[in-house]
Image (cartoon, helix red, strand yellow):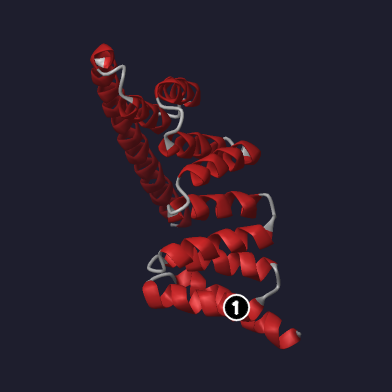
Amino acid sequence: MQNQTNSKKSTKDNSMTTSIDLKKKSEEIEVKKQLERFEKYLSYFDDQPSYFLVLANLKLQIEDIEGALKYIDEAYKLFPKAEFIYDMRAKISYKMKDYNGALMNLNQAIDINPENELYYFRRGKVLFCLKIYSKANEDYSKAIEINSSKDIYFYNRALARGCLRDFESAIADLEKTLELNPNKTRAKEIIIELRKLLNKQ
C-alpha cells in the first residue's frame, strides 16, 4: 500500500515537473519569436536607445546575458547619459553576482537622477550582498524618504538593521511592512526571532 502511495506521488510530481518544463519551454519560444520580430526591424530603429533596451530585456528573459549586454552597449553608444542604461547594466551585473559592477552602474544612474527611489533600493540590495549593512540601511532609508508606500523597502531595511543588531528599529520596520502588506508572513516570523534576541540582551 505504501509503495502504491509513493508511486502515485512520484507520478504526480513527475507530471507537475513536466507541465512546468513545457510551460517554460513555450514561454521561451514566444520570447524568441518576439526577438526575431524586433531584430528584423532593427535597422528602422537603430537610432533609438529604447529599442535596444527592449531587445536586451528579451535576451535576459532567455538567459542570454552576452546578447543583452551587446544591445545595452549599442544603446550606450547612442545615449551615454541615459540613466536607464546604467540601471539595466546594474541589473545584469547583479544577476551575474558581479556586485561591484552593479554598484558602479547604480552610482552612475543615481548621479544622473538622484530622485529615483528604485536606484537607492537596488543599490541597497547590492550593498547588503556585499555585507556593507550600514550603507545598505542608508540607501533603503533614502528610498523610503522618496516613497514610503512600498513594503519591500521597509522589509529590506529591517534586514539590514537586524544585521546591524538594531533590533528595535528592525522590528518597527517589519511592523510597518505588515501594515502595508499584511500577507507578508515572513515579516511576522522575523519579528518573533528578533524579540527573542532583544530579550537576551
Measured from the top left, where is residue 15 in percent x and y?
35, 41
Q: Foreground: 190 or 59? A: 59
Neighbourhood count class around disc 1 (C-alpha, 10 Å): few under 14, some 14–19, many 20 upward: some
Question: Considering the image in quadrants, where does the C terminus appear?
Answer: bottom right
Measured from the top left, where is residue 137 in percent x and y?
61, 63
Q: Residue at x 60, y 78 (%)?
A: 169
Q: Residue at x 26, y 24 (%)?
A: 34
Can residue 147 be seen by looking at this rendering?
yes
Hey, what amino acid is under mark 1? Answer: Ser
Measured from the top left, where is residue 119 in percent x and y?
48, 49
Q: Foreground: 30 or 134? A: 134
| In the depicted structure, whether residue 47 falls above or below residue 184 | above
In the image, taking residue 81 as reference, residue 107 lies left or right, namely: right
Q: Foreground: 113 or 164? A: 113
Query: How many circles with numbers are drawn on the protein?
Result: 1
Extreme-right residue of the structure: 201
